[in-house]
């Protein structure tokens, strides 16, 4: 891991999680009487062996490192899991921990061949033979097995950090198809985790959290926890609210009250890159949630011109460098 910021200097808990080394943590939970398995490289499951009340026990999937250069959540979860493993009896949820793109984390890169967070779909076209497609298959199989005997309380928190600055430093993408009660619970938790904005997403872009929501009934979300940083050099303080809320969820305790409710946005349109002629109408330094007025050009792709349709739309995840056929940006409108 010489390319991830100096593995020798990393705290042991962070080094272990970044390298998908679950040995010490797994042993502590096993000694505490949990059923602990490692169904694949980078995946750990910890389940209660008490049959009574199992249907009322939440099943929580936490994923980090789906993009190999988004290291902040790895540090957050490493410290949280290490602390919890020393108080293993406090774990009140069945837990699956997934370290996503292990190869990219080790290389200090975003991905090896292609974006892993676009691979959780049946149709992959020319990307079918990539390392990330194979990894997504492994992750989906483990996810299906984890939720196969789960009760109704199903969560998937896919933790990321954003490439570019944002008007809202923390925000989350929530699939619209989540059942109403579970969606309300998830949005409440996101507010308690200090998330400033929530985007309701009506359609899959092949992301991991949308997959778990669509196919396994999970209250899934992609959570952006601030900016990308180097492993071992992240400002952990910026993740304090999210860490406290996640710790409370796993311990079956109420999360701290939200300082303020997040703003909620609906997706107005998805900007799809149709060809190599795709060009966005603004610079690469454009922040997430930058507002554009009605009629403004968003992007141009040959004869196709994307323009703002509502009185105001805000751009999120603008990225002209994605592969042809993938989403190059989201346009959203505020509803709350």
Image: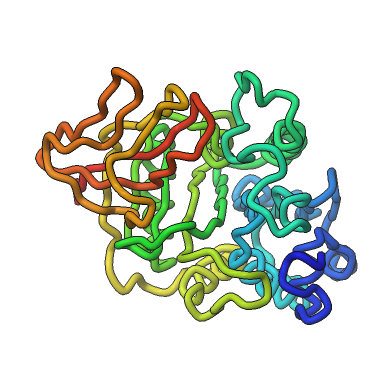
Residue at x 48%, y 57% (from the top left corner): 163
Q: Residue at x 38, y 39 (%)?
A: 329
185 or 281: nearer the eye?
281
Q: Is residue 73 left or right of residue 84?
A: left
Residue 61 percent across, percent down from the top left:
63, 50
The quarter of the picture where residue 236 lies is: bottom right
- Seen from the viewer's position, the closer of residues 38 and 315 is 315
Q: Position of residue 15 (x, y in %)?
A: 79, 71
Residue 203 seen: yes
Note whether 8 is above or below 18 in the view shown.
below
**Residue 166 screen position, x and y as percent:** 35, 61
216 with respect to 37 (left or right): left
Q: Say above or below: 165 vs 316.
A: below
Give the left or right position of residue 90, taking residue 333 as reference.
right
Residue occupying image coordinates x 85% and y 50%: 38
Residue 112 x/y as whole percent: 72, 44
**Image quadrant for the N terminus?**
bottom right
Please report the residue visible at 63 percent of the width from the left and 58 percent of the height from the top: 69
Q: Quadrant of residue 272?
A: top left
Between residues 78 and 235, which one lies in front from this camera angle?
235
Q: How is the image coloured?
A: rainbow
Residue 50 visible in rendering:
no
Q: Is residue 57 toward the left or the right of residue 33 in the image?
A: left
Question: Is 295 rendered above or below residue 22?
Answer: above
């Amino acid at each position: 891991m010489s390319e991830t910021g100096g593995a020798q200097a990393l705290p042991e808990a962070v080094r272990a999680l970044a390298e998908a080394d679950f040995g010490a943590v797994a042993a502590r939970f096993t000694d505490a009487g949990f059923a602990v398995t490692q169904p694949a490289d980078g995946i750990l499951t910890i389940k209660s062996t008490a049959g009574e009340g199992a249907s009322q026990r939440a099943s929580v999937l936490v994923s980090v490192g789906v993009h190999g250069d988004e290291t902040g959540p790895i540090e957050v979860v490493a410290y949280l899991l290490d602390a919890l493993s020393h108080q293993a009896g406090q774990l009140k949820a069945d837990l699956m921990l997934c370290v996503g793109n292990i190869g990219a984390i080790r290389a200090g890169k975003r991905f090896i061949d292609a974006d892993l967070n676009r691979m959780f779909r049946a149709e992959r076209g020319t990307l079918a033979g990539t390392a990330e497609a194979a990894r997504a298959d492994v992750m989906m199989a483990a996810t299906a097995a984890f939720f196969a005997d789960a009760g109704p309380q199903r969560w998937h928190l896919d933790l990321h950090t954003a490439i570019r600055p944002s008007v809202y430093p923390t925000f989350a993408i929530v699939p619209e198809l989540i059942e109403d009660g579970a969606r309300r619970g998830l949005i409440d938790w996101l507010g308690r985790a200090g998330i400033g904005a929530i985007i309701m997403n009506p359609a899959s872009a092949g992301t991991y959290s949308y997959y778990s929501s669509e196919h396994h009934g999970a209250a899934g979300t992609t959570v952006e926890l601030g900016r990308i940083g180097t492993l071992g050099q992240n400002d952990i303080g910026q993740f304090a609210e999210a860490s406290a809320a996640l710790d409370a969820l796993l311990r079956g305790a109420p999360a701290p009250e939200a300082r303020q409710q997040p703003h909620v946005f609906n997706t107005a349109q998805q900007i799809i890159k149709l060809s190599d002629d795709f060009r966005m109408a603004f610079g690469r330094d454009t922040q997430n949630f930058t507002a554009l007025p009605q009629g403004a050009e968003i992007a141009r792709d040959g004869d196709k011109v994307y323009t703002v349709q509502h009185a105001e739309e805000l751009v999120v995840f603008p990225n002209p460098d994605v592969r042809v056929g993938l989403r190059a940006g989201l346009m959203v409108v505020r509803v709350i």
